[in-house]
Image: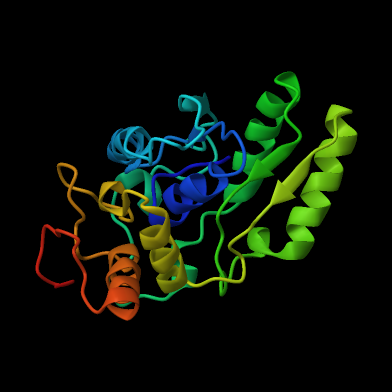
Amino acid sequence: MLCSGGLDSVVLAADLATTATVFPIYVASGLAWEREERAMLTRALEALPASSRVEPLHVLDASVRDVYAPTHWSITGTPPAWDTPDEDVYLVGRNIVLLGKAAVYCALKKISRIALGPLAGNPFPDATSEFYAAMAHALTLGLAHPMAIETPYRALHKADVIRRGHALGAPMALTMSCMKPEGGVHCGACSKCRERHDAFVEAIGQDPTIYATRRAV
């Protein structure tokens, strides 16, 4: 499973681990928030319910620093602001890079399923059902190994995921949904923090997240 350390992937890991053994994969691409995100993900995986069947986190390297401009916001750590639309956080080719690298790992390990956690309303071209079907077909052909790509939460919104996380006992406090974290704390000023804040308020009536600024409180 591709794990980013965000709400969606940590809850999905907890969910899948109730019925299967999960091999969590983090693909490092050289983006500004990855060091803090990986640290939080490690803590989250260690805090999953004791009955969860989860293998140790495996980190793969697939840098995009040689294709994204040095001035790109994901490299400089200057993400789109609180009130900007989802389209502004589009990372070109993100899922192609993640799935391609993870699929090679899976083929070598004789694993035939890759799961990831895109949600309903995702506006990006590499997050459609057509893309995932085509990618699975291409990877199966190119690796000479059967490869299914599963997106169990594609019909859910983030508030739905939070409710699911509560039901599973997932460690949602140990998740990172921020593009500019500061000392393990959400910045409270980027659009991902706004998305997290709004989803918690919708799901449970309040947002328990600690933010570096009070914009999201």
Nearer to me, 11 or 196: 11
x%, y% of residue 9?
47, 50
Above or below, comparing residue 206 to residue 10 in the picture? below
Q: Is residue 166 left or right of residue 82?
A: right
Q: In terms of image quadrants, where is residue 121?
A: bottom right
Residue at the far front in the pictured view:
51
Does the rendering let one see residue 71?
A: no
Task: Quadrant for the N terminus, please.
Answer: top right
Residue in front for this viewpoint, 110 or 123:
110
Residue at image position (54%, 71%) is: 156
In which quadrant will I find the C terminus? bottom left
| Image coords of residue 215 (percent x, y) | 14, 72
Query: Going 21% across and 65% down the picture, which residue do you hit?
Result: 189
Residue depicted at 37% across the width and 50% down the height: 170
95 sits to left or right of 195: right
Question: In the rendered picture of this protein, how many numbered marks are placed on residues?
Answer: 0
Tell me, what colour scheme is on the image?
A: rainbow
Extreme residue toward the top, this view: 108
Q: Can residue 46 be seen in this view?
A: yes
Above or below: residue 66 compared with residue 201: above
Residue 207, above or below 72: below
| Residue at 52% from the left image edge and 50% from the top image edge | 15
Residue 195, percent from left and from top? 35, 70
